[in-house]
């Protein structure tokens, strides 16, 4: 990465993704606490270029060549031994011997290493634990296999992830990355500098030879940081600290730029003196620029306006590029009218839901915290390794249904084997030890593990006098013929333990009597459709990713009229909100359907059965569009028999 001369003529300051990303990487290398950078929706082919730029920036900060910065790549196959231990070969008096030394994350190098995570959603559990333990920590301790080491973590983590996968990650892991940017449209520049050349003022600020000036915070700094963030409970203080630290890094870049390019006094015509030890003042202006750098979206301040909404008159070009300075915000527009409606309404009532959200193909402004739009995180989301299962034959992994004479030494039944040998104990030796001969060996008989799954989401509040058995019969017959397992999610059933939550159960086959009872259950009042789709998505995700036998096909059938009057947050907590629901429940259901669609359609097939109930006939089609599903339209005639049309 080349550096421009300090007094060369500079082009007009850019406001594109490449310049934003370069500014964020420089801020991470300049500020000691900004150790984690998370980039959303970056095309995979641009990952090596961005990683190379970050390595060059860290090399400038450590006064070392870019190739001297150690790199460590973490992926789905990373184990604990790959992170904390490293085999060493040394010569001794007895010859060559192998020993163990500190691993790549123990930071034995002189310069801070670069930890690269190409896909954070597919990172192994040991890698996630290492990120939670090291990112933002003041000290770290390693005690493993006779190695004892204590150090201050200085490594910079560069991770990549899709925005739609952020809802499936642990919030503890996401909070460890203070710098987050969405760069779906990044187009690196050709040549040696994919993100543009590094300004000389920035290189001087990064260099360890430059004296570091102290920083002071202005009076309104803390208030401006809190004003930029949402006032919601449970978010913690990491976001406020990250925003303040980015603002401090931008202020230090401004100070370095002023040192390289001192302003000329209009009265005297001489350069203004720069005091070397003068503190750098961090003001609310830097906080606003930091919020626009990461495209922070809040409830009271919208994101930065799109390029076409910028004023026609552009500011004159500055002598140097300086830190990221986008166009100032023009303030929020007029607030839309509040959406009103009862929190829980009777299933037959017709209450206006307000205008439906416009579904645009063009992506809107990106938020650095996409997990907030998915509601509260899953209950009990921990970073524990799942139980290990041996890979043996598929027939040895099903449920035990009997015992038979063993044909080999695999999957033996020890209790039945001992009981069989005890029958002949008196003949084989009397009071001596129990003698087991090959004829006594018994093995388990296991049922075959199902390789197909049928997931039913039953909205009881859409039934009325309509008989949904004819519409569901083809899917139940498919599950019966293919011996598929069944997962049933019930929404709005009368007599539920909590009417704001959806209930679910799993069955090994369609012959389970609980399925017939679920199909005959009467309707209740509330419709937690969003919570039901969220539970169905979790069940499908577990089955497709962690099923022991490996699912080959899954079917999702949703029977609903699309009227969800319970928000997802209320469904997960089981407590009513303080205000009216409006369209919140319907919007949460659409978002939950979009997360199911993100699982892919290679092994998952989705169907929405629309009962055609008025007056909201467009809601099932909207839900099917978000789910990527086919729609089966059914109507109820006078006798109450449902027919597909």
Image: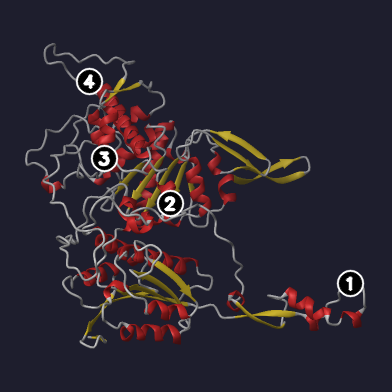
Q: Which quadrant of the figure has residue 290? A: top left
As drawn, 430 above or below 93: below
Please tell me which residue lies in front, 285 or 415. 415
Instruction: Give the residue at x 48% y 45%.
Output: 131
Q: Nearer the viewer, mark 3 or mark 4?
A: 3
User: What kind of element bears circle 2?
Assistant: loop
Mark 3, residue position: 293
Q: Nearer the viewer, mark 4 or mark 2?
A: 2
User: What kind of element bears circle 1?
Assistant: loop
As drawn, 520 above or below 27: below
How much space separates mark 2 and mark 1, taking CA atoms?
Answer: 54 Å
How much space separates mark 1 and mark 3, taking CA atoms?
Answer: 77 Å
The mark that comes first in sequence, 1 or 4, is: 4
Q: Which quadrant of the figure has residue 287? A: top left
Instruction: Give the residue at x 53% y 36%.
Output: 109
- The percent position of residue 643, horizontal first and vertical second, equals 25, 87
How much space separates mark 4 and mark 2, taking CA atoms?
Answer: 47 Å
User: What kind of element bears circle 4?
Assistant: loop
Instruction: Give the residue at x 25% y 46%.
Output: 17
Q: Nearer the viewer, mark 1 or mark 4?
A: 1
The mark that comes first in sequence, 3 or 4, is: 4
- The percent position of residue 273, horizontal first and vertical second, equals 24, 14
Please tell me which residue lies in front, 591 or 119. 591
Mark 2, residue position: 170
Left or right position of 176 against 341: right
Mark 4, residue position: 262
Q: Residues within 10 Å of mark 4 (few under 14, many from 20)?
A: some
The mark that comes first in sequence, 3 or 2, is: 2
How much space separates mark 3 and mark 2, taking CA atoms?
Answer: 25 Å
The circle on residue 433 is 1
Asked if the residues shown at circle 4 and circle 2 are in contact, with their CB atoms under 8 angstroms apart, the answer is no
Asked if the residues shown at circle 2 and circle 1 are in contact, with their CB atoms under 8 angstroms apart, the answer is no
């Amino acid at each position: 990465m080349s550096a421009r001369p300090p007094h060369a003529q500079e082009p007009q300051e850019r406001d594109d993704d490449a310049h934003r990303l370069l500014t964020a990487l420089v801020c991470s290398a300049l500020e000691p606490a900004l150790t984690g950078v998370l980039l959303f929706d970056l095309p995979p082919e641009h990952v090596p270029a961005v990683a190379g730029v970050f390595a060059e920036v860290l090399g400038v900060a450590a006064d070392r060549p870019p190739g001297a910065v150690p790199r460590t790549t973490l992926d789905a196959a990373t184990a604990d031994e790959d992170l904390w231990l490293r085999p060493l070969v040394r010569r001794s008096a007895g010859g060559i011997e192998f020993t163990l030394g500190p691993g790549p994350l123990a930071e034995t190098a002189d310069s801070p290493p670069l930890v690269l995570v190409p896909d954070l959603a597919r990172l192994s559990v040991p890698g996630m634990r290492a990120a939670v333990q090291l990112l933002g920590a003041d000290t770290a301790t390693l005690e493993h296999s006779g190695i004892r080491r204590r150090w201050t973590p200085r490594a910079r983590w560069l991770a990549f992830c899709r925005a739609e996968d952020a809802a499936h990650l642990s919030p503890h892991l996401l909070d460890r990355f203070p710098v987050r940017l969405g760069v779906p449209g990044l187009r690196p520049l050709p040549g040696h500098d994919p993100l543009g050349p590094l300004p000389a003022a920035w290189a001087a600020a990064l260099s360890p030879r430059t004296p570091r000036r102290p920083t002071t915070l202005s009076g309104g700094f803390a208030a401006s940081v809190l004003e930029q963030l949402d006032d919601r409970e449970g978010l913690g203080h990491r976001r406020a600290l990250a925003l303040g630290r980015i603002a401090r890094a931008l202020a230090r870049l401004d100070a370095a730029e002023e040192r390289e390019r001192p302003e000329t006094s209009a009265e005297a015509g001489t350069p203004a003196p720069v005091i070397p030890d003068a503190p750098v003042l961090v003001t609310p202006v830097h906080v606003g620029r930091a919020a626009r750098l990461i495209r922070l979206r809040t409830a009271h301040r919208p994101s930065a306006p799109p390029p076409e909404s910028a004023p026609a008159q552009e500011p004159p070009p500055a002598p140097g590029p300086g830190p990221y300075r986008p166009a100032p915000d023009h303030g929020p527009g007029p607030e839309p009218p509040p959406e009103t409606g009862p929190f829980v309404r009777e299933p037959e009532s017709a209450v206006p839901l307000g205008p439906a959200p416009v579904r645009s193909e063009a992506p809107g402004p990106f938020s650095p915290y996409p997990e907030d739009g998915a509601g509260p995180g899953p209950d009990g989301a921990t970073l524990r390794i799942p139980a290990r299962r041996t890979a043996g034959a598929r027939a040895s992994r099903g449920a035990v249904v009997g015992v038979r004479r063993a044909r080999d030494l695999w999957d033996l039944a020890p209790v039945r084997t001992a009981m069989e040998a005890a029958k002949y104990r008196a003949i084989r030796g009397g009071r001596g030890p129990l003698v087991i001969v090959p004829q006594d060996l018994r093995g388990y008989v296991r049922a075959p593990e199902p390789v197909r799954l049928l997931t039913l989401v039953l909205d009881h509040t859409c039934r009325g006098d309509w008989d949904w058995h004819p519409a569901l019969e083809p899917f139940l017959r498919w599950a019966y013929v293919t011996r598929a397992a069944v997962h049933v999610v019930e929404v709005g059933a009368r007599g539920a333990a909590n009417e704001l939550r959806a209930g679910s159960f799993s069955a090994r086959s369609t012959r389970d009597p609980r399925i017939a009872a679920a199909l005959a259950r009467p309707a209740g009042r509330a419709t937690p459709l969003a919570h039901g789709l969220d539970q169905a998505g979790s069940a499908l995700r577990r089955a497709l990713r962690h099923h022991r036998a490996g699912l080959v096909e899954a079917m999702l059938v949703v029977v609903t009229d699309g009227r969800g009057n319970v928000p997802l947050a209320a469904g997960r907590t089981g407590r009513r909100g303080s205000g009216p629901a409006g369209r919140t429940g319907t919007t949460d259901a659409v978002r939950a359907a979009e997360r199911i669609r993100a699982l892919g359609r290679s092994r998952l097939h989705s169907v929405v059965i629309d009962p055609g109930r008025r007056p909201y006939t467009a809601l099932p089609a909207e839900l099917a569009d978000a789910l990527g599903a086919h729609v089966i339209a059914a109507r109820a005639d006078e006798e109450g028999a449902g027919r597909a049309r």
